Image (cartoon, rainbow, N blue to C red):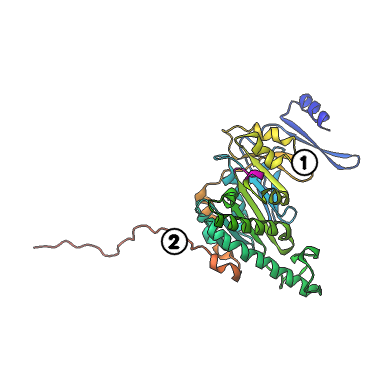
Amino acid sequence: MAASAERLRHSWGVHAVYVDEVKPGVVELRLVGFDVLDRVRMPRKAGDGFLRVPVALREDATAFVRDYRAMPHQLTLGATLSGKSMYLRNLVTGLAGQRVALAGIDCKRGVELAPFAPRLSALATEPGEAAELLPVLVRLMEERYDLIKARQGIAPNTPDEEITSDVWGLPEHQRPVPVVLFVDEVAELFLVATRKDEERRDEMVTQLIRLAQLGRAAGIYLEVCGQRFGAELGKGATMLRAQLSGRVCHRVNDEPSAKMALGDIAPEAVEAVCAIAPERPGLAVAGDTSGGWSRIRTPYLSLADAAAVCQEAAHMVPDVPALDPFRPAAPVPSVGQPISLVKPRPVLD
């Protein structure tokens, strides 16, 4: 089909032709007359819904939808100024209006996620705080497994790994709210300076792996972001990466970084990542475990606009008592100079 699409593109004089097999004997042709990734305009019908965020535009002019029910955990890589932060902003604002608890671990002292504090249920801005937040999320996951066991009559001593159902099988009035955990600059969690830091690192990595392996059924989803991510980070890095089925890779500084993101699921996409130009921020390659991949680009969204969306959606923060100790203090909006209602009168001698 790829060869036929290239011949059709030359015959019709268009930018690209995409051929998709709908069913045996039936194909769908999509003609694109220009490079839609040059100036991103999201389609009106983007396929959004609960836990579905149309976060970018594909090169075939369709929306790239981040579906947490279908792809629970994702790894997003990108060098500085590659558009990775823009991708994260679009994700947060897309989830802000939904009944979802948003938690964040921002290892850059909160400069990326702190502006979204009004909509966050939890925020850790350094590895020490992350070491306290992750065990709480693991306990929350275990409590949800106990809830599933009690509802379905499963024996209390049944290992979590053997429970095949999830929170979506519970009645709506008993169903706990989903939790999406954003981890920015994940490599910072792996860095150690002392033996004490190494013990803390091992605990955090183990907890992240547990959340990645077992969190989906409990309604807990991971969005892990960073500049590099591979075996050189230390013990557990490769195991964690294997659990992050979704992959998005923006421009990177070297080929090994691209291989970290896509080499194990879509090897041919590595060359496409290395060809991304620095003057096209937001351009990325998205792959999945099926081996398929496509170029995508995130629409521009300023930090101020994203923060305003989270401020307006502050009332959507769900009640999750376990996360209350980590709830960030929402910034107080600045108020201009108050207008005096007292009219001055001249003083006459």
Where's the C terminus, which quadrant?
bottom left
Determine the residue located farthest toward the front in the rendered image. 195
Q: Name the residue under label 2.
A: 332
Total count of labels: 2
**CA distance separating discs 1 and 2:** 45 Å
Query: In the drawing, does residue 339 fall left or right of residue 266?
Result: left
Residue pictured at 59% horizontal, 48% vertical:
187
Under circle 1, the secondary element is loop
Mark sitting earlier along the chain (1/2)? 1
**Position of 70 relative to 340 (above/below):** above
In this view, the residue in front, 13 or 5, is 5
In this view, the residue in front, 181 or 1, is 181
Q: Residue 168's image quarter?
A: bottom right
In this view, the residue in front, 52 or 224, is 224
- Determine crowd level at label 1: few under 14, some 14-19, many 20+ residues with C-alpha closer than 10 A: few
Q: Name the residue under label 1.
A: 292
Residue pictured at 78% horizontal, 41% vertical:
291
Question: What x and y, as percent, mark residue 305?
Answer: 52, 51
Amino acid type for the residue under numbered disc 2:
Val
In this view, the residue in front, 39 or 180, is 180
Amino acid type for the residue under numbered disc 1:
Gly
Evaluate if marks 1 and 2 touch, with contact meaning CB atoms under 8 Å apart.
Answer: no
Determine the residue located farthest toward the right in the rendered image. 25
Question: What x and y, as percent, mark residue 8?
Answer: 80, 28
Front: mark 1 or 2: 1
Determine if residue 50 is in view. Answer: no
Under circle 2, the secondary element is loop
Residue pictured at 64% horizontal, 64% vertical:
137
Q: Residue 269's image quarter?
A: top right
**Position of 237 relative to 274 (above/below):** below
Q: What stretch is highlighted in magenta?
A: 227-232
